[in-house]
């Protein structure tokens, strides 16, 4: 799985932006971005339709991630949700299919459906999103080491996942996929620590925030943008090497939790 991807939250919500958004995804593919993340929730399927347009003729270039609603987590619900997503994206398979957040359906039903979809070749791998430690432990034991990822709200200013969840995942070889890695219009990018590190490396604060995440073990980032120039800027963060001084300065400014905290979610 690539360590850098393009998020598509808020895409597919406005028909007059459809072509612009599809063009942005195609531009990302041209830049070398290979992972595209989406969900049936985004634009109620609209983002998946944008992706379908963008990847037409280029399916083999893409590692495609999508997510299904918890209220579709029953055996039949998962099967039907997957079929709808495949139709919207006009493709034959999804590389990584995730339950968007925990719900009330017994996980045995959900994972039975995911296994069947995998056997049918409609998904290549499966995982979860926004699952805390207790919820991860409720997954059938045989599947706890088979998860393709746990996609979570994770950035320099929100490190809740580091209390328990990331270690549990790391011990089982499960990547953490960080959504909202730039913390969506927060004060993160204007902080003195981030700007100081950015100035030292002659890069942007956003690139520093992404590079910090990419320095965390087994972590994938999926920043969202519809602007090709910003996508390229974000992608360039992959090659930024932060030193021990940089990491220590950022850790001091944004410390990891030192007590039990709930997993963040947006």
Image: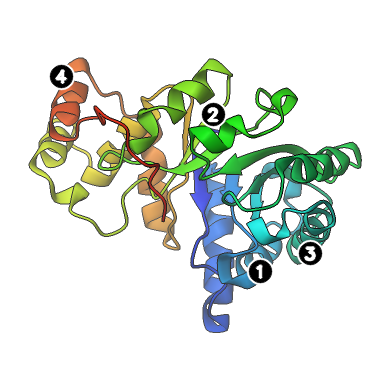
SS for dot 2:
loop
Q: Which residue in the protein does label 2 denote?
A: 175
The first of marks 4 and 2 along the sequence is 2
Q: Who is closer to the viewer here, 190 or 112?
A: 112
Q: Which residue in the protein does label 4 denote?
A: 245
The first of marks 3 and 2 along the sequence is 3
Q: From what the image shows, is residue 114 above or below residue 133?
A: below
Task: Tell me the mark number nearer the camera, choosing from 4 and 1.
Answer: 1
Marks 3,4: beta carbons within 8 A: no
Mark 3 to mark 2 CA distance (whole Å)? 27 Å
The first of marks 1 and 2 along the sequence is 1
Task: Tell me the mark number nearer the camera, choosing from 3 and 4.
Answer: 3
Marks 3,1: beta carbons within 8 A: yes
Q: Where does the C terminus fall, quadrant-wise? A: bottom left
Q: Which residue in the protein does label 1 denote?
A: 45
Tell me the residue at 52%/25% (across/down). 169
Relative to 178, 233 lies left or right: left
Relative to 233, 152 lies left or right: right
The first of marks 4 and 1 along the sequence is 1
Mark 1 to mark 2 CA distance (whole Å)? 26 Å
Q: Which residue in the protein does label 3 denote?
A: 84
Relative to 253, 42 lies left or right: right
The reply to whether residue 34 is visible in this rendering is: no
């Amino acid at each position: 799985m690539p360590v850098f991807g393009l998020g598509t939250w808020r895409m597919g919500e406005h028909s007059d932006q459809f072509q612009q958004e599809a063009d942005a995804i195609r531009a990302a593919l041209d830049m070398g971005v290979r992972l595209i993340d989406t969900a049936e929730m985004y634009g109620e399927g609209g983002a998946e339709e944008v992706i379908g347009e963008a990847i037409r003729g280029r399916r083999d270039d893409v590692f495609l991630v999508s997510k299904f609603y918890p209220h579709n987590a029953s055996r039949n619900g998962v099967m039907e949700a997957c079929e709808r997503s495949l139709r919207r994206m006009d493709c034959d398979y999804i590389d990584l299919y995730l339950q968007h957040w925990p719900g009330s359906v017994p996980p045995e039903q959900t994972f039975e459906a995911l296994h069947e979809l995998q056997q049918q070749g409609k998904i290549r791998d499966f995982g979860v999103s926004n699952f805390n430690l207790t919820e991860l432990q409720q997954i059938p034991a045989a599947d706890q080491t088979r998860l393709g990822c746990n996609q979570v709200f994770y950035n320099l200013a929100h490190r809740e996942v580091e209390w328990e969840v990331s270690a549990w995942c790391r011990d089982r070889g499960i990547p953490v996929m960080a959504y909202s890695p730039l913390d969506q219009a927060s004060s993160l990018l204007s902080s003195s620590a981030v700007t100081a590190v950015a100035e030292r490396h002659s890069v942007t604060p956003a690139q520093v925030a992404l590079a910090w995440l990419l320095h965390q073990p087994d972590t994938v980032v999926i920043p969202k943008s519809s602007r090709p120039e910003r996508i390229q800027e974000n992608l360039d963060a992959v090659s930024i090497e932060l030193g021990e001084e940089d990491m220590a300065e950022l850790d001091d400014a944004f410390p990891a939790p030192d007590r039990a905290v709930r997993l963040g979610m947006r």
